[in-house]
Amino acid sequence: MKIIIYGANEMANAVATELFEDHDVIVIDPDQKKLDNFLRLDVGVMCADALSIKILKEAEVGKSDAFIAVSENDEKNIIACLMAKQVSNIQTVCFVHKKESLESLNSLKDEHRTSYAQCIENIIWPQKLLVQEIFKIITVPDAVDVENFAHGRARLFEYRIKEDSELLHKQLKDCYFNSEVLVVGIVRNDELFIPNGSSVFCLNDKVILMGTPIGLDIAASELFESKGTVKKIAIIGGGSVGYELAAELERTSMNLKVIESDYERCEELSLKLQKPLILNGSGTSLELLEQEEIGKCDVVVAITNNDEKNLLCSLLSKQLGTKKVITRVSQSMTANLFERVGVDVAISQTEACVNEIKNRIMDYRAGVLATVERGQGEILEIQLKSDFEAKKLMDIKLPIPCVIAIVRRGSKVIIPKGSTVIEPNDRLLVFTKTDDVIAVKEYFE
């Protein structure tokens, strides 16, 4: 694919880094100094502004497959995408950073179905992606990742093996999991692998489970001590992401606190939010955290725009006794480091956006339902053809390690065993490593 990226910022760098090895990438920005940061990559650069049809033609947008506008200016991103559409029928991805921009585009689509707004196929609001990821993890005690499939009738949970875990040092074949759950992956030292019966669970491993909601809840309570519900939450950082998360959480019955260092921002939050307690202070103040009994919180979310501050807030909260700490980080490499020093869950907004872009514009990713472990694993949905030969799962000889975790047959969700018969027109949810996605698809085709 040929891909044009407008805006030479951190997000553009992450997208280009992910795509340049397999695709022809060109980055457009009017600031040459920003473009210099891309010289280490094998990408083309243009020092210009993509708001001109002339510039877009020079960049050969008519011969390109995707146009991604990631600048910090919403209006410029929108105009650039619309200009690209005037030149060709290119697929567009538009980043917006203000809620008002997103609402305006959606309003135009609703009111004028043939308007230019419809030309922007993909609109990404990075803060909302991050909020959605955090919200899913908050609602499941002890889980470090959560994904939903089949309209909520199938789920993925990820848990860390702790010192008191019943699974520690046991082989998978010797561990009991109820019939509604399958172990599909293990992450050890930041590396994902597909386990077999002889795989041993080690300290600090992350175990990836797929199954029905009820089956996963039972497994969580029996094996990972996930008992009870999340009742008390503290959010450190009341910026745009902190506000959106608090707005989502105040719809629940959870007891919520928001700690924000800027007094004027606290006043704004107190007017916008009804239920949460808004506190003016620093999340790095041990005195404040002790005074507000942060150690008794079920979850603390450190969500400021500063990685170092988030890490300090997280470690102080863990030291005081907080059960789970979720931390916002700028990059996936930073996330791995944070989790190694004691943070339960570190989430990168940039990584979430890159995965979203790949899911939307890459042809080979059609059918990819979710990406896990920072792009190492993926869940595919594969529709079997009507002439597929029915056979038992144990008789399907897959050429690469993967797990058929869910079988969807009409409205029915089946957690398969070796004796389960796979039938024509079944939809399979398959867990595999990202490097093996194409091989899995080719096998079933």
Image (cartoon, grey):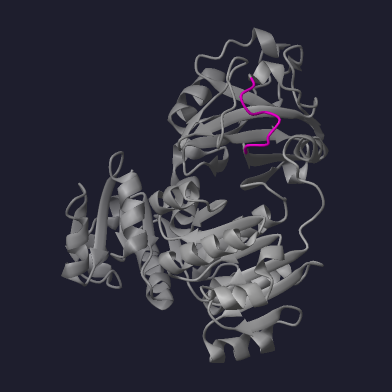
Q: Nearer the viewer, residue 195 or 294?
A: 294
The number of numbered discs placed on residues in the rendered structure image is 0
Q: Position of residue 370 (x, y in %)?
A: 57, 42
Q: Is residue 151 above or below residue 114?
A: above
Residue 34 vertical position relative to residue 133 in the rendered view, above or below: below
Compared across the picture, whether 244 is left or right of 392 comes to left
State the quadrant of the C terminus: top right
The spot of residue 415 in percent (x, y) is 76, 26
Q: Residue at x 68, y 10 (%)?
A: 394
Q: What segment is highlighted magenta in the picture?
A: 162-170
User: 233 or 404: which is nearer to us?
Assistant: 233
Q: Tell me, yes or no, whether the highlighted magenta stretch contains residue 306.
A: no
For residue 430, side relative to residue 360 (left or right): right
Q: Nearer the viewer, residue 232 or 165?
A: 165
- Relative to 422, is 430 on the left or the right? left
User: Could you tell me which residue is drawn at 39 percent across and 49 percent down?
Assistant: 333
Camera sees residue 110: no
Prevalent SS, magenta region: loop
Outermost residue on the top side: it is 395
For the point 39% across and 73% down, which residue is it? 79
Quadrant containing the N terminus in the rendered view: top left
State which quadrant residue 87 falls in. Answer: bottom left
x, y (%) of residue 103?
A: 59, 75
Q: Position of residue 219 (x, y in %)?
A: 77, 35
Can residue 400 be seen by looking at this rendering?
Answer: yes
Residue at the (52%, 20%) spot, across then down = 401
Position above or below: 425 against 287:
above
User: Which of the 4 image quarters holds residue 265?
Assistant: bottom right
